[in-house]
Image: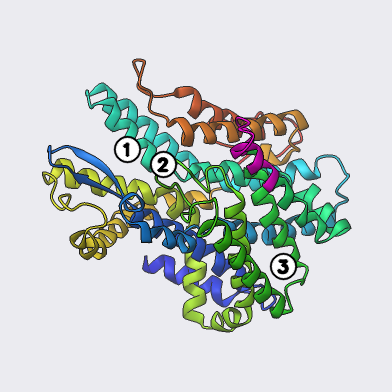
Amino acid sequence: MLAMWSKARELAEATPPERNRWVDFLRAVSILAVVFGHWLMAGLYVNEAGELQRGDLLSVSQWAHWLTWGFQVMPVFFLVGGYSNSVSWGAVTRKTPPEQAGVYRDWLASRVQRLITPTFPVLLLWAALALILTQVGLPREQIRMATEAALIPVWFLAVYLLVTACTPVMFRAWNRFGWASFAVFIPLAMLTDWLTFTAEVPWINFTNFLWVFLAVHQLGFAWRDGRFDNRWLAWVWFAVGLAVLVRITAFGFYPVSMVSAPGGFSNSLPPTVALLALGMVQVGLVLALEPLGRRMLESVRLWTATVLMNGMIMTVFLWHLTAFVLVMTVAWLGLGGAGLDTVPGSAAWWVSRPLWLGLYILALLPLIAIFARHERSFGPIRGGRTVPRLRAVLGVTAICAGLGATAGLTIASPEGVTGVRLWVIALVLVGAALMGFGPVYRPRNRPGLPKAG
């Protein structure tokens, strides 16, 4: 860790003055909020029958639902994504006309590679574990529960990929229509909720993954374009968003919880208008605080910590629930259920939280040391050659389908000899290979072209 800190310190001191450090800070904080939110809300305990049972703080503590307004910060990540994608796509199109063949496909393939490459190890490890545990006779329900818990984060990657793929179109829409390119998603999200809850149209609610997060992504363009430089606008945005959010949750139809609530109603899977309102609240707040935050990040120590976190951000995000499962497994199987005798939400459970959080962090540290390098292990896409259009489309589609199935179905299968849904893993690997990278991609070197490396 000392070597990682030293390297981060060198990068921090070399940061160009024009870089908006608040963007990197928000990215780091939003991921950490998700990590600690998962660690805090989820839990396992031994019931009166001596059986291991899943616990959920939200199911036993009504007041804890309000905590999700602080821990459900995916909108902030999409805001930062919009800012970063506008910088990246803008830089590409300044060098090369966007209509030139291959520009968009190469840009998208590069973004996909950076997002998905760190995902391969966690998917392959859990596929191997599911296979091994099935063969040794562990109950398949326990295997399913472990893989489901560990791989929860991957649903977000599928949605983020889809939103990122829309960047050029939405960037053009922002430059032409401005705020209207954001506002159009509000009635779309409202209509989707009406069709879902009133007209009871099946599956239509999944379109809100696009409408809600594209809306927040558009605000990243607005931020990059200087539209929130007037901080009064950000504060008004915050106040109006908060008023709407309170009205439609505490005094309205939607539950207060911004994640899965008791009864199966979820404001996030898929998103609802309530999550969009929360996004407006969070956007207004973080952009209103930007001047203070940028002054704060002039501290070399704090900026170095931010650089360090951003250098392993995907590793922390993807592996934090594996660390959780590892600690729970040791406590249950290795220590005979030690520490698992407190029910979530009880006074004893709260007193023990600092100890458990410390154990989760200790379990995560070696995973970071082993797997963080995959966030920087990028070779050239297809050996530097342009990704063919059909392969790019099929590749992104396969990756998103595989990640969605991993989160929705889990990779553990209740049937079959292997105990693994191999087709789920195959979708991600084949999708990456179609785009020109990944463990199963084997480039064909041609005369006159550099070798892929």
Res. 4 image quadrant: bottom left
Q: Which mark is residue 146?
A: 1
Label 1 – label 2 distance at C-alpha? 22 Å
Within the magenta stretch, is there residue 199?
yes
Q: Mark 3 sits on what residue?
A: 223
Res. 285 image quadrant: bottom right
Query: Measured from the top left, where is residue 92 in percent x and y?
Result: 79, 55
Label 1 – label 3 distance at C-alpha? 40 Å
Circle 2 packing at 10 Å, graded few (<14), some (14-19), many (20+), is few
Nearest to N terminus: mark 1 or mark 2: 1
Query: Measured from the top left, where is residue 194 in percent x and y?
Result: 65, 42
Nearest to N terminus: mark 3 or mark 2: 3
Tell me, yes or no, if residue 140 can be seen here: yes
Q: Looking at the image, is 9 positioned above or below residue 198?
A: below
Q: Which mark is residue 263?
A: 2
For the point 76% across and 38% down, which residue is it?
Answer: 386
The colour mode here is rainbow
Drawn side of residue 347 relative to residue 17, left or right: left
Q: Amino acid at mark 2?
A: Gly
Magenta region, residue range: 190-205
Identify which residue, 411 or 303, lies in the foreground.
Answer: 411
Drawn side of residue 185 relative to residue 45, left or right: right
Identify which residue, 96 or 63, lies in the foreground.
Answer: 63
For the point 58% across and 31% down, which residue is it?
Answer: 401
User: What secondary structure is marked by label 3?
Assistant: helix
Tell me, yes or no, if residue 379 can be seen here: no
Dot in front, 1 or 2: 2
Q: Which mark is residue 414?
A: none
For the point 75% across and 65% down, which residue is it?
Answer: 222
Q: Looking at the image, is 25 positioned above or below residue 163?
A: below
- Quarter of the picture containing the N terminus is bottom left
